[in-house]
Every structure is written in C-alpha cells, then in structure tokens.
Amino acid sequence: MDILNNKILICNCEKTMDIDGLELSKACQSSSNCKVENNLCGSNIDVVIEALNESKNNNKNLLIACTQETKTFEKVAEEHNFSMPSTFNIREYAGWSKEGKKAIPKISAIINSSIENIKQTPSLTMESSGRCFVYVDHNKGDEAVEIAADLCKKLANHLGVTLMICNFKNNIMIEANNYKITKGSINLAQGYFTKFKLQVNDFSEALVSSKAKIEFGDFFQTVDTDCDLIIDLTENTPLFTGDKKRDGYFRASTNSPSDLFEIFTKTIEMIGQFEKPIYVKFDENLCAHSRNGITGCTKCLDVCPAGAIQTSGDIISVDPGICGGCGFCGSVCPSGAIQTDYPSLDIILGSLSKLNYDFIKAGGSNPALILFDGEFGKEMINLISRYGNGLPANLIPYEMHSVGRVGHDLLVSSIALGYKKIFILVDPKNNEEFHFLPKQIEISNSLLSGVGNNNNSISIIEENDPELVEKQIYDTSKYTKIKPSLFIPLGAPRGILRAGVQGLSKSNNNKNDIIQLPEGSPYGKVDVNLDTCTICLSCVSACPAGALQDNPDAPQLLFREDACLQCGICVATCPENAISLIPQFNLNDEAMSAGIIIEDQPFDCIECGKTFGTTKSIEKIIDKLSSHAMFQEKGKTEILKMCEDCRVGAMFTQKDKILDVKERPNPRTTDDYLN
C-alpha cells in the first residue's frame, strides 16, 4: 500500500500472523488497498523486486514489514542496482500475539512511525590500525596462557597482536610466530577504542631467538604504550569501570570458547575508520556541579558507569570517546546541562506522541508503553512473541539505545501524552547500574499524584524469565486514571516537563498549586531565615541557575522558583546559615518570575553620604567587631559606618597612630659583625 510518498510491503510470515489487509489500509488511511503477502523473503521475492523498481521510477521510499530478512532485501536491491529499502517489525511487536487479531491499530502506529525521518546525531571519527593487546595471567595455569596464545595466532592474520603475560613462569614454551610475546603487569589503563594508553610495570619482550623456552630481553621497570583494542583474559578486576560499556575493551575467560569466538569475530573487523555517535551534548553554562570551589550537584558523576564524566574545576567534562550512551546522566541532570542526544528528549517524546496519536486514530484504546533497549529488552520481547503469548494489543513497544535515559521528565510527559501505563524493561544483570531509576519513578509518581489519580502506573521489570515478564505486561491493574493533556514536547527538559504537568493539572481540575516532592528532587524553593539573612548576596553570585538574584537598584534578594535546581550551593555558601531547601513543584505561573524574598534599607556613609551597603549587613558587622580589641575605645566602631574611602582617611587621623611603625634600623655591615 501507499502512504504519502512511501511504498509499504506487508508480509504475514507464511500465514503465522492474521492480518486483514483491508482493515489495515483503512487504519493507515492509505490511498490504496493493502495486499498482504505470505513470503516476501522467498516465494514472493519478485514482489520486492517490482516494488524496488517502482520506488526507483516514482522516487518513493520502500519499507518492508520484516526486520529478520533485512540482509536478504538489501542483497536483492544491490544485485538489481536499487536503493536499499527500510524495514520495520510488526511480527514480534504485534502480529505474533494471542491478541494479534486486535493489533491492527498498533500495526498502523508502527507503520506510520517507521516512515518518520529521525534527526541524525553528530559523530566522532575514529581511526583504528588494528593494534591489539591481549592480556593473560599465568597464575590461571599453563592452559590459560596456551589458549591465549592460540587466540593471538588466529588474530594475527588480521590484526597486529601483542600478547602480555603477567606473573610469568618459566615452565612454558609458546611459539610467537606472527605476534609479539611480552611479560609484565598493567598498572594503569586509560582511554577508549583506538586511543587506549597503558602503563606497564616489570616489562620485558621475548627474544626472537628463544628456543626450548622463552628468553626475554631488556627489563624495564615501567613503560608506557598504546593500542587500539584490549582483550583481557586475566579474569581479574576489570581494567575499567563500566567495562561492558568501554568500546574496544573485551573481557572473557579462557574457559569459555563461545566468548572467545565472539571476541574473535568482533575484533577482526575493528580496523579502519569508524564513526561513533556523540551520545550526549553538554552546556557548561548550565552546569550546577560547583561554584567557587563549593560542590553542589554531583548526580551525573554518581551515575556514570563508564567513567566518561570527570570534574574540571567548577564544571564537569564529558569524554565522547569513552561515553557509551547509557543515558543515565541525562536522566538525573537537574538543569539540562548534559543531555542525551541519541536521540534527544524532545525527539523521543515526539515519536511517542505520534505512536499514541496514530494508535488512537486507528481505533486503539488504553495505550500502554513498554520501553526497552536493543539488546536484552529486544531479545526478551522476541522470546515472549516466539514462545509465549506475545505483547498485548494495546502495549506499544518503543526501542531505545538505552533505557538509562528514562527519567521523570520522560515518564511524566508520556503519561501527559496519553499512555495509561508504562513498563521499563531492565536487564537484571545490570540492575545495580540502574540504582537511580526508582528515585526517578518516585519523583514521577509524586508529580502525577499531585495532579490526579495516578495509581502508581509506572513499573520496572527486572526478570530473566519470559513467563514472569509476560505475566506483568498482561496485568491490567494499576492503569492510571489521569486524564491526558496532549502538548507539543519542544525545548529543554525542564520546560517540557512544566508544560506537561501544567496541562495535566488543568485537564484533571487540580486546585492545588504546590506539589510536595521527595528529598533530592530537582525542583523546589529556598527557605531564607529573614532574621539572620543580611542580604550579603553571596548566594546570588554562587547560584549556577540564576534562581537567586539581586536588584542592582536596591538592597533586595529575589528568587525565581522554576529555575531552582535544589543543588545546595547556596546553602553551603551562605555565611549566616540562613538558607534551607524545600523540594516542591509550583504550578503557578508566578514561579517563572523573580519575587522579593527579603529587602532592606540602604546604608549611607556617615561622612560623605555615599551608599555602600545594607543596614542589616553593617549592623551585623558592628555587632561582631564591637568586642574586638581594636574597637574597644569609644567611637571606634564609627569607622565601620564609613565607606571605603572615608574609612581610610579616618584611620590616618586616629591619635593612637595604629598605622605608625618604629624608626627603621640602620642596616648592619660586615664591620658590625667583625667588631
């Protein structure tokens, strides 16, 4: 069938899916009827060739409803000199289900979503010359070293290989052939694919003249080297934090042939030029990590599993070569300074909005959402569809590069867009990395409960058993009763969330402007003790978000609530300990403008009349210094009531001559010492 400028081919995979072509074409509002094919990758391959030809002649895009046979279709297109078709999945996501007959609205939504063009993400160019470093521990036995050597021998046909043996024992002989053999221990490892840097202790290289046993050459206590790839077979502590997310770093046991074979097949292709997506974008002007050496927000540093984020003075820095795109930082960043750009939040929500819109438009109801990654999550859904009951007809699947980007902003906005329940599919092997996710759900539930009957409609699924996962996704309880409020999710995450929450508040007739939030939430206000605050404005200069402001024309402290990140820098900066934080979300539009917290009368110099401070601050200074020895005499504290110019003049007129010094002594000479 045709949709706009797109040719769509639908296959029921040898009649394993019950798809009504006429009903589907109506749901998609296609200008032509949908003919459902039985075997596009086999007996109906001529249909694909004809569609490729038609698409070329009419300048159309061709999309085929089958991801399993993508390579087959690409091979056919290449053989006939046609442009490559796109593919999308309706089998595992909709058709292979006990509710497959009711899945037409979902299939329609998937089709319409597939024809959307996704914004391209900037990339980092990497050049690999194939320098491969294999590391093994002799303490694991002679067999471990022999297996590592055999792997090196195979790899050396494709890459430049160096084998390093730590804790080397002289009772083994392995032949170097076409790779280098060294001994030593890695003391420090840094970098990423194509740019690894290693510091090796007790290094020595095997002599090519070695005969019955390996003889080593010159010994070096410490050497520095670099490489493109690292294969760690020591089974010791990983060389990197978040080792599974460090591109170019592979770990395996020499007792696992399947893992070694997988590493071999991957690494032999890792030579040449590569494009790695730059997963996040960072705006240092919004970063609330630190000000004037006082630490505030450390949330991105706390959650990054790969060590890609480091402190750099008062802000942080992100190494795009190390970053694996887990999205954790974007989920927890309170200011939006660091955001996932693969894709960005507004693009994710735009896609979810369209999926929901097309689903409802095609006749669907009570849309639920399951968020999953392209590895564990995708495989789990495939297992449920192939061996179980498949996905419910109302459960819309959305694949993400990583579900680590699932923060409260995405969850609350998704409910606002119309989803009645949200499942987050997490690999239980990595659940420790997702320790921040329950907090994000807690904030989401607080925001949603503050505007309507939320019913705790957001769930994390951490199961390895497909049957247990299936049981949860078919549970029809805890669907939210909140009425949605459709909006266009554009702009920064905080702005998107505010638009969504305010819309939900109106659609659910919420009368409360203030929503109480749990500790650690990135929204709230500051509580200033009016009795102890001297309006010194230290907090204003320290506030990274501009939430605390001053008035250049009057001694006033102002506060804009919607800008407050609850980072705590103001609390740590205040010399009077007059500030505390109150986590809350203010729905009133007044929160978007600065209001006066405290004001005071200006203090004028008693000599020249120049304004140089506030009354409260000068009185505070006088009170603190009145007991000091320098200000015990009568009238001495009057100096503190003068501006900086008059104060200097007054000090020189004092009778006690505070600034006088003794008469300068004559310099001593050599004669003085000799005599």
Image: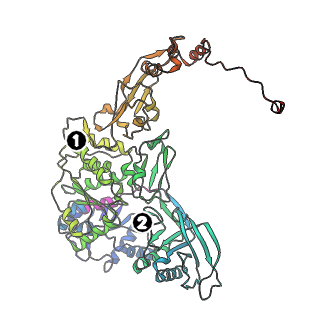
Q: Residue beneath label 1, please?
A: 450
Residue at 39%, 26% in the rendered image: 533
Quadrant of the rendering where the N terminus is positioned: bottom left
Kind of residue at badge 1: Gly
Left or right: 544 in relation to 481: right
Kind of residue at badge 2: Lys
Quadrant of the rendering where the C terminus is positioned: top right
Q: Residue beneath label 2, please?
A: 244
Start-end of magenta stretch = 107-121
> Can the viewer see residue 491?
no
Residue at 17%, 66% in the rendered image: 99
Residue 135 place in picture, x, y as percent: 51, 73
Q: Quadrant of residue 208?
A: bottom right
Circle 1 residues within 10 Å: few <14, some 14–19, many ≥20: many
Foreground pick, 376 / 186: 186
Left or right: 33 in relation to 133: left
User: Considering only order in the chain, which callout, 1 or 2, is on the residue closer to the N terminus?
Assistant: 2
Number of numbered discs visible in the structure rendering: 2
| Magenta stretch encompasses residue 111 | yes
> Can the viewer see residue 651?
yes
| Magenta stretch encompasses residue 632 | no
Taking 122 as reference, is 48 above or below it? below
Residue 151 place in picture, x, y as percent: 49, 80
**Colour setting:** rainbow
